[in-house]
Image (cartoon, grey):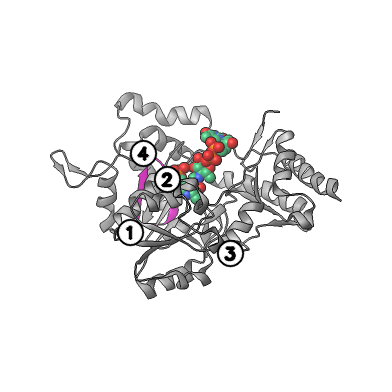
């Protein structure tokens, strides 16, 4: 049976609102290369996130690759990160000729286990790339303390954490820089897109030139850059979607609350809870299944949902440190909790327009797996 409820569904403004926003592009014929929409979205985001600098990108991955390159990290330098993430995080490190050193994750929120970072630091360590996975906030204070002690850069993969705040401060404001993804599947999207946020003003020119071939002026090419510019149609989508972000998050919250009502307290099911001081964005709905207690494995639940037209996803399985492309370079046993969780986690459908009736249907199927095993 074809899946008809997928893990997520892009949020879009009304057709009329988007058309109104892009109308001017037919007057100006200015479609890309840091046009008026690009400038407006950048300034809207700086205000919204309360961060001094936002540089926009065509996608989150190139944003992360570029900001890592901009940090002038030594070739083959070691970067402490986690394998419980999307391919992008690890690939951005490796594609910068840096060496990922994998740290395990915490059992409760799946972010980097800060108690294990210091034991991984060597004289080649140059940076930490933690991931606010599912929008769960890393221990930003402890990470900064360690980074200050050892003189390390901190670049957050905040792809999932747009709109998340800690004690009223946006995730854009932590570390040396934070990268957001504005992909179609995210809480806030620009179709494809991404951004790097930071306070160091000296990085602005560098990042802007890096995403535009290293071109400083019509006759000056300062260095060998690439092309990672966000176009005007993407920026226009962002301008529209930002107007509806509060509503988007409120609708997601309602769905998450229903999931929690139905699934919490069931033996063998583990959900993420709210984090102290954190204003969440309800980006994903991860559920961890303990086969012994629940009576059915993650894969059995996945299959039961698929048979009923529900497309849950195994974000993040497999771990990035097991990817074929690395030819066994990393030892997965060094991150046992990440391995444990990746074999048991399922992200259930979650998006703004997901109805409570559909959440109930999904929960009925999940719970029927337990009953079948009793
Ligand atoms: N760091 C982290 C931690 C990330 O999770 C990501 C991206 C990045 C960095 C890199 O950011 P970007 O360069 O992507 O901006 C999806 C997304 O493509 C990817 O952005 C995301 N993470 C990752 C977790 O999920 P897939 O391969 O699972 O996507 P796909 O095509 O299977 O789509 C998933 C579901 O989304 C579909 O079942 C239906 C829905 N969907 C998809 C598309 C493309 C829509 O509703 N509309 C759409 O246009 O990677």
User: Quarter-wise, where is residue 356 in the image?
Assistant: top right
Q: CA distance from mark 2 to mark 1?
A: 23 Å
Q: CA distance from mark 3 to mark 4?
A: 35 Å
Residues at circles 3 and 4 in contact by the CB criterion of under 8 Å: no
Which mark sits nearer the N-terminus, 4 or 1?
1
Q: Is residue 58 magenta?
A: yes
Residue that badge 2 annotates: 60
Q: Can you tell me whether the CB of the residue at mark 2 lies under 8 Å from the nearest atom of ligand 1?
A: yes
Foreground tag (2 vs 1): 1
Q: CA distance from mark 2 to mark 4?
A: 11 Å
Which mark sits nearer the N-terminus, 3 or 1?
1
Circle 2 packing at 10 Å, graded few (<14), some (14-19), many (20+), is: many
In what element is the residue under mark 3? loop
Residue 187: x %, y % from top left: 54, 45
> In the figure, is residue 361 to the left or right of 116?
right
> Is 152 or 102 nearer to us in this picture?
102
Residue at x 39% of width, y 26% of height: 23
Foreground tag (3 vs 2): 3
Q: CA distance from mark 3 to mark 1?
A: 27 Å
Q: CA distance from mark 4 to mark 1?
A: 30 Å
Residue 191: x %, y % from top left: 46, 36
In what element is the residue under mark 4? loop
**Residue 230's disc number:** 4
């Amino acid at each position: 049976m074809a899946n008809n409820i997928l893990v997520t569904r892009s949020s879009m403004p009304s057709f009329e609102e988007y058309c109104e926003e892009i109308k001017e592009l037919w007057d100006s014929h200015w479609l890309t290369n840091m046009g008026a929409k690009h400038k407006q979205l950048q300034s809207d985001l700086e205000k919204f996130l309360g961060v001094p600098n936002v540089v926009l990108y065509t996608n989150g991955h190139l944003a992360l690759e570029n900001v890592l390159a901009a940090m002038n990290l030594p070739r083959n330098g070691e970067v402490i990160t986690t394998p419980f993430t999307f391919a992008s995080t690890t690939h951005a490190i490796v594609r910068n000729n840096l060496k990922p050193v994998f740290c395990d994750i915490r059992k409760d929120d799946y972010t980097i286990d800060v108690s294990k970072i210091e034991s991984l630091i060597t004289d080649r360590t140059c940076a930490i790339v933690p991931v606010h996975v599912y929008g769960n906030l890393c221990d930003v204070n402890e990470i900064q303390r360690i980074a200050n002690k050892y003189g390390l850069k901190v670049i957050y993969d905040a792809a999932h954490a747009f709109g998340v705040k800690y004690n009223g401060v946006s995730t854009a404001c932590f570390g040396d820089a934070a990268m957001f993804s504005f992909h179609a599947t995210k809480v806030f999207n620009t179709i494809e897109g991404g951004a790097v946020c930071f306070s160091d003003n000296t990085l602005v020119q560098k990042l802007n030139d890096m995403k535009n071939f290293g071109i400083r002026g019509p006759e000056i090419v300062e260095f060998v850059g690439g092309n990672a510019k966000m176009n005007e149609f993407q920026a226009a989508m962002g301008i529209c979607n930002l107007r509806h972000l509060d509503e988007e998050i409120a609708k997601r919250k309602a769905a998450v609350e229903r999931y929690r009502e139905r699934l919490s307290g069931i033996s063998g099911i583990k959900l993420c809870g709210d984090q102290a001081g954190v204003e969440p964005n309800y980006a994903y709905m991860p559920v961890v299944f303990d086969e012994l207690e629940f009576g059915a494995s993650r894969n059995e639940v996945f299959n039961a949902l698929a048979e009923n037209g529900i497309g849950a996803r195994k974000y993040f399985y497999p771990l990035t440190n097991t990817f074929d492309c690395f030819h066994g370079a990393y030892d997965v046993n060094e991150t046992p909790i990440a391995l444990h969780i990746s074999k048991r986690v399922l992200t259930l459908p979650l998006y703004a327009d997901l109805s409570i009736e559909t959440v109930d249907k999904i929960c009925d199927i999940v719970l029927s797996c337990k009953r079948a095993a009793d």
